[in-house]
Structure formats: C-alpha cells, structure tokens
Amino acid sequence: MARTPLIAGNWKMNLDHLQAVAFVQKLHWTLKDAAHDENSVEVALFPPFTNLRTVQILIDADKVPFVLGAQDLSTHDSGAYTGEVSGVFLDKLACRYVIVGHSERRDYHHETDAIVAEKVQAALRNHLVPVICVGETLEQREESGPTAVSVAQLQVALEGVPADADVVVAYEPVWAIGTGQVASPEQAQEVCAALRAVVAEKLGDDAAARTRILYGGSVKSGNVASFLREPDVDGALVGGASIVVDEFAAIIRYQKHVGV
Ligand code: PGA
C-alpha cells in the first residue's frame, strides 16, 4: 500500500500569530515558485495554540495547501482544567492532527505512558489523528538496545485503539532532538520497522500497511531524503528546521534534490 509521505513542522514555542501569517504565506510562495507538486507529499503545520486560528483562516480561505495540527491536547474534553486545551476545540478549528507524547512533554511535564495513552483516546474521540511520539534517551539505548523503549511506549499508547483508527507514529530518539546529533538512516529504519510490527500486533496488518511512521530529530534539508528512502520511514517530524522558510521548503521538496 502506497503511503503518502508526511512532512510535519513542529514549531514548538516559536513564532507569534503575526509571524505565523508571514511565515505560512512565504512558505507557500516559496513552494509555488519552485513548482512543488502539492500531491506528492502532505505538509502539516503544528503552530502554538495561540496561532491555530490564524493559520486555520489561511487554510480555510484556500490560500495555502497545508493541513493543521496542534502540539498537545488535554486528556479531558471540558471542565475545570485551567490552562488545558480540549480536543473538541481543536476539532472545531479543523485541526487534522495532534502531537501526543512528545519527549519535551514527557520530560518537562512528566507525561507518563498512561497519560499519553489517554491523550491518544482523547484525540481519536474528537476525530483528530494523534501523532504518537516515542523514543529513547542515550542511556536507555545503551541499557536496553535501540528498539525496546520505543516499542514499549507504543504498545501502551495503542492500548484499546480500534483497528480502523487513523494514527501516525513518530520515532524521535531523545538524543537527536535539537542536538544536531542525527540518527543514521539505518538506525531510524531499524526502530521504525519495529514500530510497524507493534502496529501490526495491536491493530492488524492492514493498519500496519497504511500507518505512517515518521522519523524526527535534527532533520534538515541535507539529510531528509536519506531517511525517506528507508522502507519504513514515511515522513519527518521537523522541529528547528521547520521555522526557517527556505530550509523547510527544501525539506518538503526532498524528492527534488536527491532521487528517492
Ligand atoms: P528538531 O526537533 O528537528 O529540532 O531536532 C524535532 C522534534 O522535537 O519534533
């Protein structure tokens, strides 16, 4: 089954809503100038919550060929949860995706595997596609090998997920995020293949064949094609390089600069 590659830009806590307008329009023009084929790859933008409406207006007005995602969501749909953002609201804003279990949330906000699993359920019941992030620290890699931590994290996250659910998985080795220390394509492939086996075990072979598995961690225009050439890597979750217009446009156009 052919899987449409997904290039996802996680802005993290960067770009205010005015900068977002300028950025998104410039990205669109840059791709247009380069005659980028919009259908060859899906591009999702994950701005901060305060910019979702701004970017959604541009998408809604059919001005830009991107889809919208949020960086996180609450485990609850409504109620007394100060500061939290409900999946109901994200759905209303026409978000398609929501990142769940990013290592920065697991680390700085103490999100456990159980909380991540609850967020996956919150996303699915609100018609959002969770982008489930998993990945090991360097110590964990040395202790238990390259795949064990990611496999265990994904097994918990997929608990109770129906076989026909739409999910995306992102392998993001913690030691490669924002460090410039990128995993090799072979290392990414090894873990992504193991994660696909988890999807097969939990959701069945059809789901494993259609589910996109991304690599994330210091992805740049110069290395993205080498990851996307691997059979089990279906896209990239890009942090730092996703807020630099020319760099992100070059990542989106990865097929152009190295034959895939
Ligand atoms: P990075 O971040 O591309 O800056 O390494 C990736 C991520 O955290 O999603």
Image (spheres, rainbow, N blue to C red):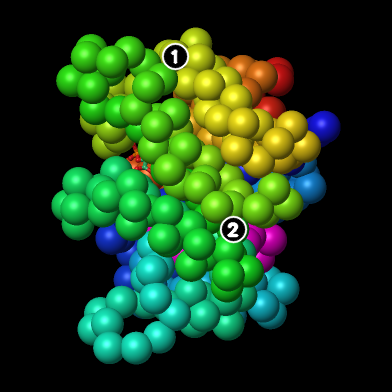
Residue found at x 33% / y 64%: 15
Total of numbered circles in the picture?
A: 2
**Disc 1 residue crowd, few under 14, some 14–19, many 20+, Cα 10 Å:** some
x and y percentages locating residue 144 in the rendered image = 28, 15
x and y percentages locating residue 190 in the rendered image = 50, 15
Tell me if label 1 and label 2 are in contact, CB under 8 Å.
no
**Three-letter amino acid code at disc 2?**
Val
The residue to which callout 1 is attached is 187
Residue found at x 46% / y 64%: 70
**Three-letter amino acid code at disc 1?**
Gln
Q: Nearer the viewer, mark 1 or mark 2?
A: 2
The residue closer to the viewer here, 99 or 80, is 80
**Disc 2 residue crowd, few under 14, some 14–19, many 20+, Cα 10 Å:** many
Give the vertical position of 83 relative to 245 (above or below).
below
Which numbered disc, 1 or 2, marks the residue that appears first in the sequence?
2
Residue found at x 60% / y 38%: 202
Q: Is residue 256 in the magenta section?
A: no
Task: Decide if residue 135 is in sight here.
Answer: yes
The residue to which callout 2 is attached is 129
Read off the magenta span: 64-71
Q: Which mark is residue 100?
A: none
State the SS at label 2: strand
